[in-house]
Image (cartoon, rainbow, N blue to C red):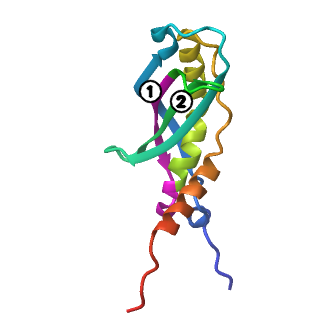
Amino acid sequence: MTEGISMAEEAAAQPTAPTMRVLGQFIRDMSFENIMAQKGAPTDVQPDVQVQVNLDAKKRPADHQFESAIKLNITSKNKGGDQTLFVLELDYVGIFHIENVPDDQIHPFLLIECPRMIFPFLRRVVSDITRDGGFPPLNLENIDFMSMYRNEVARRQAETPPKADA
């Protein structure tokens, strides 16, 4: 006699695919300074743009809700000089409903997949702000969030001293 597995038992044994929904996204904090206009600098400038990116994520009080934030610090200086043209600081947040992601994978999920989902919207905000601020629209290059995550993990491991044997 063979033992059969019911379809319900078989379905329960199958791993459930992760699900993610973007519940909302917003600018938590933003500052744009057009330093060139304030100082009356010449308009024939060649901008050299530096972009710093930081990521942050946390669990929200509601079940299965998380937030993931991309924090940008963008400085544009005139090439060949030290004159700052503009500074843009932006904290852009996405709120996500995430289910069926194992606990050991939620951290990279929040710092790789979630930022990847909201980045196109952030790119548009940066383009609009720089254009409305009197400069050509700044179109951010794609960001490799996977590489950023791996580099941060490697950096933290390098900073952690090896544990001595007891």
Q: Is residue 117 visible?
A: yes
- Quadrant where the C terminus is found in the figure: bottom left
Cα distance in 3D space between marks 2 and 1: 18 Å
Q: In the rendered view, would you say 72 is above or below 98?
A: above
Residue under the point 54% across and 10% down = 41
Residue under the point 45% across and 70% down = 160
**Which structural element holds mark 2?**
strand
Left or right of 20: which side holds 7? right
Q: Nearer the viewer, residue 76 or 164?
A: 76
Q: Main secondary structure of the magenta part?
A: strand
Tag 1: residue type?
Phe
Label 2 environment density (alpha carbons within 10 Å; few <14, some 14–19, many ≥20): some
Magenta-drawn stretch contains 56: no
Q: Is residue 64 visible?
A: no
**Which structural element holds mark 1?**
strand
Tag 2: residue type?
Ile
In the drawing, what numbered circle is on residue 74?
Answer: 2
Magenta-drawn stretch contains 97: yes
Residue 44 position in % (x across, y down): 66, 10
Write down the residue under mark 1.
26
Left or right of 2: which side holds 25? left
Magenta residues (range):
87-107
Q: Residue furthest front?
A: 81
Residue 163 position in % (x across, y down): 43, 82
